[in-house]
Image (cartoon, rainbow, N blue to C red):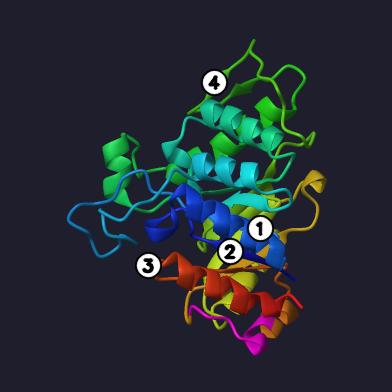
Amino acid sequence: MELGVHGLNMKATLGPADTRRLARLAEELGYTSWWAGEHVVLPSPRTADSPMEPTDGLLDPLVHLAYVAAVTERLQVGSAIVILPQRNPLVLAKQAASLDVLSGGRLLLGVGAGYLEPEMTAIGVPMARRGKRTDEYLDAMTALWTEPKPEFHGEFVDFADIDAHPRPVSPGGPRIVVGGASPAAFRRAVSRGHGWFGNGTADDLPQHLEGLRRAAEEVERPARLGKLEITYMQLEPVAVDPAQARRYADLGVDRLVIYPLPLEDPDDVAKFLEHHAGLIR
């Protein structure tokens, strides 16, 4: 089981010096992936469903990940997650391909349908049918990355007689990781994702895995996607002990992601990374 870290594009760890220091430390310690979250805007004043204060700093994930890729050599850089309905799919496809090329094929493009209504309303995207929009955007982006003469005709995206280069390093495009724990998200992961990104507690995971199993009975998985990779981030407790790590591995987790909250002191984050590096050995 591989080990990754999430969330260091926010709060006290978002500056360039701390990003360089922590990303290089993670790579030296044997972490294999570095994940960045996204919210373009947040409700102000904070609402109950908002994950952060509106005044907390949070960098755009793709910009942040490009910087991390530039100061490291091996770390995979992942978005966890890009709120896909809020993005123009052709622009995002270009950005993702660019980052994948510049990182040498290290991009893991994590996407989700989103849930924060004030954010979507401010951006001008309706909450209604955001799942359908997410699925269609993924299909349109895949067409742009993979087809000799890209063409797509859908409800939300329609194009033909265009092309975009450079293509991603992998002929199939960057690896898509689908986030979410709804039945629709599970179906999306099975039918369109190379992997699934979940979060919660160790006790939550079996239920999520059962949801993925049921989804696999409902939708077809294209052969090009291969085995569904399971990436999981423990939220409670924040620290992961060896027994918990073994349980995750036994359940079939391919990549365990730690989240060094509360992200108030970069030195504390460095110690958190060093402490959890023992799980790799």
Q: Which of marks 3 and 2 is nearer the N terminus?
A: 2
Q: Residue furthest top?
A: 161
Label 1 sits on a secondary structure element that is: strand
- The quarter in which the N terminus is drawn is bottom right
Q: Nearer the viewer, residue 216 or 225?
A: 225
Residue identifier under label 3? 264
For the record, the magenta segment spans 238-245
Determine crowd level at label 3: few under 14, some 14-19, many 20+ residues with C-alpha closer than 10 A.
Answer: few
Instruction: Using the numbered discs, state the Cα–Cα distance from disc 3 to disc 1 in whole angstroms.
Output: 22 Å
Point out residue 13 in the picture as x, y percentages from the top left corner.
Answer: 44, 58
Find disc 1 in the rendering and name its residue.
33
Q: What residue type is labelled 3?
A: Glu
Residue 69 at x, y percent in the picture: 64, 44
Q: Distance between the residues labelled 3 and 4?
A: 44 Å
Q: What element carries label 3?
A: loop
| Position of residue 261 measured from the top left corner of the image (x, y, whole percent) | 43, 71
Residue 113 makes an appearance in the image: no
Q: Mark 2 points at which residue?
A: 5
Label 4 neighbourhood size at 10 Å, few (<14), some (14-19), many (20+)? few
